[in-house]
Image (cartoon, rainbow, N blue to C red):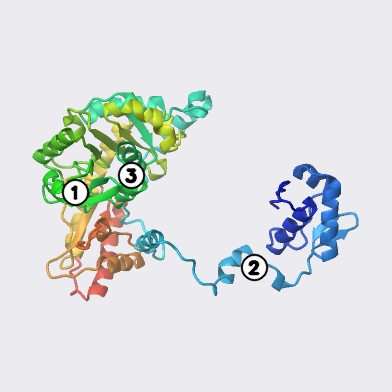
Amino acid sequence: MRVALDGGAGVPLRRQIAGQLRAAILERRLPPGARLPSSRRMAAELNCARGTVLAAIDDLIAEGYVVARPGSGVAAAANLPDEMLAPPRAGAAAGAAGAPPPALPARTTALLAAARDVASGPAAPVAFPLGQPDREAFPFPLWAKLLEREWRRPGWQVAGAPHPFGHAGLRAAIAAYLGAARGFACEAAEVVVTSGVQQAVTLFARAVLEPGARAWIEEPGYPGVAAALEAAEAVPAPVPIDAAGFSAEAALAAAPDARLAVVAPSHHFPLGTVMSLPRRLALLAWAERAGGWIVEDDFDGEYRYAGRPLAPLRALDRSGRVAYLGSFSKLLFPTLRLSFMVLPPPLAAPMERVMAALSAPAALLGQGALARFIADGHFAAHLRRTRVLYAARQEAVVAAAARHLRGMLAVPPDVGGMHLVARPDAGVRLDDRAATAAAGAACVRVARLSVCYRGEAAAHGLLLGYAGTPDADIEPAIRRLADALAVRHAAPARPRD
């Protein structure tokens, strides 16, 4: 019943009890005919005299809100007029249909507009969601055993007093893995386990920037980066990228006072561009010369299907100016909600002291299991299997698009990643908001390219996440997408080869 008494409110306890019970009855939290607890129990739970409770109940009986039943206590009245009662919870939305909508701030309105971009069809779409790995590839039975082993008898450092940077075993496993797989050495003391890339960007920006400072971001780029910087009271400064990726020269021309750059050099989101080696060295030289900082987002660098990847910025960093970010949620399964940040060595000790004041640590539930998953070689084996799987799926999407989207969208292959960019063919005008809605109505989930731009000169296109799309669904989904777009754009009939 949510009755709470306030001895310092200046209102007699008898009236507080009666008023809150009356509200519970009118709001149907106490349904008609529901029995009240005994006066002794209520007095014990409210820590007041039983006589006070009895007096409040007597008031309600006199007003007709409750009735006394011989031998069965006191119950909410069952004959109150309907107009006195609030509508039942199930019909609350319908009861408020005539009320004006609540006034929401502009940023909330923008979030709602972005959420509407993903239209739902008659069934849950399985193609082509972004950031979704294959739902069948992950070894969940093995994961369950690792979780059970970790939590059978957890130490107090895990169950009750965790380190602000996360599970010690996981941090050590990440450091060892990065040395072997990504080619740079780091210490476990520099690794911070986070709940996502956005949390990591916010933490780092709050640690190295003054409020109101500007930070370079890629244009286009992952919208969450700008949101994370704004949460840290920083000002995002978009820098257009070209075929060679992010340019420090262009960034200095756009915002010469910036002291932080957030970039994805190994595989840019959403375009897939790889930053050239001269550009990488130029950005590192700027950071060393200007005392700036670099956040390197390597969100899907593990998936490269052609050629050898360039060394991460962190591997080339000589002056300790690069924070390296990675994500397990995109590689394993989304609800894991675990990512990591490797801090520049000079910041490891200060960040440990201030971490508690900046943010809550990531949940430890799966960190111990993930540490064992990495240390025992299961993580590397999972990446090898899914790398082959995703490369084949990308080929299937490109081939199906060539057959069914000809004359509307071009879907070129990418050297890596987990999604492809579909751009309108020459002479085709595409409104990607309308195209996304049409695809959703056909039970195909795609994302808009234009939302990745902050400026007005936004390119339109569709982002197709293929990693989590089952093989058997690729061809039918591309065909449904083509049919939806053909109806909207009145495109000529396509061959069904």
Q: Residue at x 70, y 73 (%)?
A: 83
CA neighbours of label 1 inside 10 A, class few (<14), some (14 to 19), many (20+): some
- Residue 114, how many percent across, how many down? 35, 60
Q: Residue at x 56, y 70 (%)?
A: 96
CB contact under 8 Å: marks 2 and 1: no
Residue furthest toward the front? 10
- Residue 270, how many percent across, how many down? 23, 52
- Residue 103, how many percent across, how many down? 46, 66
Left or right of 421? Residue 446 is: right
Residue furthest toward the right? 70
Give the mark, 2 or 1, whose residue is nearer the N terminus: 2
Frontmost of labels 2 and 1 is 1
The CA distance from mark 3 to mark 2 is: 47 Å
Mark 3, residue position: 211
The CA distance from mark 2 to mark 1 is: 55 Å
Q: Nearer the viewer, residue 98 or 370?
A: 98
Frontmost of labels 3 and 2 is 3
Left or right of 115? Residue 434 is: left
Three-letter residue code for mark 1: Ala
Q: Nearer the viewer, residue 268 or 494?
A: 268
- For the C terminus, which image quadrant? bottom left
Q: Is residue 170 above or below residue 412?
A: above
Res. 87 mark:
2
Mark 1, residue position: 255
